[in-house]
Image (cartoon, rainbow, N blue to C red):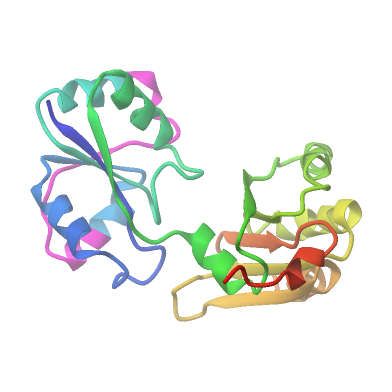
Amino acid sequence: MGTLYVVGTPIGNLEDITLRALRVLREVSLIAAEDTRTTRKLLSHYDIHTPLTSYHDFSGPGKTRRLVERLAEIDVALVSDAGMPGLSDPGYPLIRAALDAGVTVTSVPGPSALVSALVLSGLPTHAFHYLGFLPRKAGARRRALERVAQDEDTLVFYESPHRLVAALRDVEAVLGQRPVAAARELTKRFEEIVRGPAGAVRAHFERTPPRGELVVVVGGRDEAHADAEDPD
């Protein structure tokens, strides 16, 4: 029986990969990649020649089943376009299916845009609520925000560039002028983190439309917890 390695890969800067990740990517028999073109650039940079197969949103249950069948005999590495597989990407079905089949699943930790944005936001990190991608439609998006409006924990979600301004308008409408940090191009040359009240951050991106997916971090209800004493 093989092992499924869930491998974290760089979110931007190709130097942000662990020695263990490089070894695993070299040693496994197959790499299942969200986008083989993106992964091939990473492998080429480190002179790795392991065979690739695609595993993405449209792969379907048949592809999942075939990969699990191969895991009966070989080791497979699962990678996403960037960061840790399984977080808001197509990796979850394969992880679940492998576990159900009795395959050993282990992680090779690596970068995460979620965690990087959170620690750079300047907002409390002791407890947070990860929302994934908010719904595309405004009504559903506002209902999603209403469900967490009373949370005292910091809120974190991913957003696409063409929906960011609309999402920030909904944050304003539902949550008010809470402190927000919107992070883009993390670890890259043009890394940008815009911090301020929700309206100010929204106005910035209205003037300067963003590129690339973003991580948005929003302060929890009230802001009393922002002044909480350090537990140490």
Q: Where 57 falls versus 146 (above or below)? A: above
Q: Where is the N terminus found, in terms of image quarters?
A: top left
Residue at the (14%, 23%) spot, across then down: 72
- Asked if residue 127 lies left or right of residue 150, the reply is left
Q: Where 121 falls versus 5 (above or below)? A: below
Q: Position of residue 104 (x, y in %)?
A: 22, 31
Give 91 or 217, whichever is nearer the viewer: 217
Magenta stretch encompasses residue 107: no
Q: Position of residue 207 (x, y in %)?
A: 77, 76
Q: Quadrant of residue 8?
A: bottom left
- Asked if residue 28 lies left or right of residue 79, the reply is left
- Asked if residue 129 lies left or right of residue 168, the reply is left
Q: Is residue 210 visible?
A: no
Q: Where 137 falls versus 83 (above or below)? A: above
Q: Is residue 229 visible?
A: yes
Q: Residue furthest front?
A: 232
Boundaries of the magenta span: 42-62
Q: Position of residue 132 (x, y in %)?
A: 60, 45
Q: Quadrant of residue 43?
A: bottom left
Give 209 or 224, whichever is nearer the viewer: 224
Q: Quadrant of residue 182?
A: bottom right
Q: Where is the C terminus found, in terms of image quarters?
A: bottom right
What is the tally of numbered marks visible in this picture?
0
Residue at the (65%, 74%) spot, across then down: 122
Q: Where 209 falls versus 23 (above or below)? A: below
Q: Position of residue 34 (x, y in %)?
A: 36, 43
Magenta stretch encompasses residue 49: yes
Give 58 or 91, whichever is nearer the viewer: 91
- Asked if residue 74 lies left or right of residue 141, the reply is left
Residue at the (13%, 57%) spot, across then down: 23
